[in-house]
Amino acid sequence: MLTSKYNEYFRTMLKPFTEIVQKEYYDAIDNICSRTRAQADKIRALERQGEHLQYIMQCENVISEIERYIKSRKDIYVPYVHELSEKVTDSHNCSTCSGNCRVNHDMHVIELNATNEAMKSVLSKLQVSTFPLYSDTLFPDQYRLLRSNMTLLENAITELVFVENNFLIPKIVEAQKQINADSK
């Protein structure tokens, strides 16, 4: 059973929905990444050596990759969705376009699906190498906080992938059909 939030997502039009996704997911994940990176930096300043730093480096790598994916969504997909929404509003027809419409519509969906799979893969790498809660580190509370932040990040990414796969991508595909972008 879907929650009322998800039921509302079904009813929301593409452009306003994308703005919701940007605020509630992309911006929120950016904030979690910033907080988590700051926590990793704090531990790195406390512990200059040891095998525990490998976990820190893995966390930093995951954060960097996720930040890259989120940036591409903000820089590429959000503007594309705005452009697509305008084309729908203007009753644009890509099948009779005079050549000014050179947007490769289906590639946006393919790339969005591919980056969702890549984000899940990145998170699974981190799950394999989780830092033990009871280790011999001098700063166990700092590591617990980092691990907690990474869990928040994992949960946010998992929900984002769900929302994009079940709501955003179908809305994009439907908008593409409305402007006959699937016929080019």
Image (spheres, helix red, strand yellow):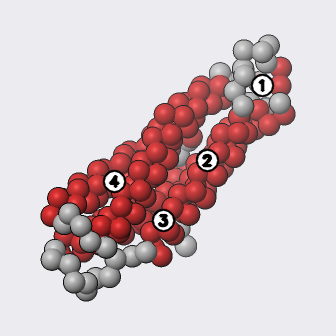
Foreground: disc 1 or disc 3: 3
Where does residue 157 sit, x and y in percent of width and height? Answer: 46, 60
Mark 1–mark 2 distance (CA, rounded to whole Å): 21 Å
Where does residue 146 sit, x and y in percent of width and height? Answer: 27, 67
Q: Secondary structure at mark 1?
A: helix
Foreground: disc 3 or disc 2: 3
Q: Quadrant of the C terminus?
A: top right
The residue indicated by pointer 1 is 94
Q: Which mark is residue 123?
A: 3
Q: Secondary structure at mark 3?
A: helix
Mark 3–mark 2 distance (CA, rounded to whole Å): 17 Å
The residue indicated by pointer 4 is 33
Q: Residue furthest bottom?
A: 134
Mark 4–mark 2 distance (CA, rounded to whole Å): 20 Å
Give whichever of discs 4 and 3 has the lower sequence position.
4
Residue 129 quadrant: bottom left
Give whichever of discs 4 and 2 has the lower sequence position.
4
Residue 88 quadrant: top right
Q: Amino acid at mark 4?
A: Cys
Q: Amino acid at mark 3?
A: Leu
Q: Are the residues flagged by discs 4 and 3 in contact, CB closer than 8 Å?
A: no
The residue indicated by pointer 2 is 112
